[in-house]
Image (spheres, rainbow, N blue to C red):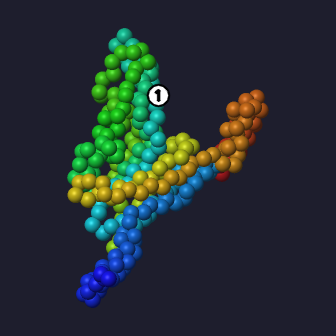
Amino acid sequence: MVGTKISTNGLFSFLAGILFVVMALPAAQAQALSCKVAPNDIPINLMYNGATLTITGVSAPGDDLIVKVSSETTDVHLKYKGKASGLFWMKMGGMEFKNVPNIYMLYSTGSIDTLLNADGRTANMIGYDAIRAGVEMERSDGTEVEAKWFEEFLKFKKTEELYLSKEGSIVRKQGATDNTYSLTVDWPFQAPPATYTVDVLAVRDGKVVDKSSAPFTVAQAGIVKQLSGMAFNNSALYGFVAVVIAMVAGFAVGAVFKGGGSH
């Protein structure tokens, strides 16, 4: 009979290797990139004036981070002005920007152009140049659109606080077993109801090495939701209610000014 012999040293090395993997596994899992956003749901009610989002998670100690808060890409229609007969400013027509996000907010631990190479920025739609690379622009009259209009689009979005980029804005803390990060986002009230996504990219040596995402929802609530439904389903009743609300508001403002003027 032929038997197989395993040396004591070989068996010890094999068991030691398994033990090392088992012990290292929790540490590796602890360093895996994670993402959590709070609150998960933002209600639009009568007192709504935007919100504050807190984004937190865990990351590997040596990685830089890029956080993108955005909506799905869509088509945005805008009106542009020009001088009629070279004299009067007026609306000259419409323009459509295709494949652009309504909301686009970018945060990072450092200079994005330094952290991530050009291919990585384009592939993950990081930075305004990446948006520019995928946008399609059309005028309502079918004439050619000059490149400058994308800059005007960006300017409009930034003014509305729907597009922004803040480098070096992520706070990081190094712990005994893992490294945490946190970010506070001022959510603009101009953002429409929708489901949005927070994407966190871990970057190392100019490349994305890990990703994590978390969704959150902005939705109408309470009387705002009821009035919105009424506007679509019962326009006559909605008009009546709107008039009543306007009258009540007018009386309230008049009473305040009258009371203030009597002193």
- Compared to residue 95, the image places residue 244 above or below, namely below
Residue drawn at x 29%, y 27% as measured from the top left? 147
Query: Where in the figure is residue 49, as x and y percent of width and height?
Result: 55, 49
User: In the picture provided, is 14 more to the left or to the right than 54?
Assistant: left
Residue drawn at x 68%, y 43% as measured from the top left? 225
Residue drawn at x 42%, y 30% as measured from the top left? 98
- Compared to residue 46, the image places residue 101 above or below, namely above
Query: Where in the figure is residue 175, as x and y percent of width and height?
Result: 36, 76
In the figure, residue 163 lies in which quadrant?
A: top left
Instruction: Give the SS element for disc 1.
Output: strand
The residue identified by callout 1 is 77
In the figure, residue 205 lies in which quadrant?
A: bottom left
Residue 168 visible? The answer is no
Query: Where in the figure is residue 115, as x and y percent of width and height?
Result: 25, 54
User: In the picture provided, is 168 more to the left or to the right than 226?
Assistant: left
Q: Quadrant of the N terminus?
A: bottom left
Query: Where in the figure is residue 166, as x and y percent of width and height?
Result: 34, 52
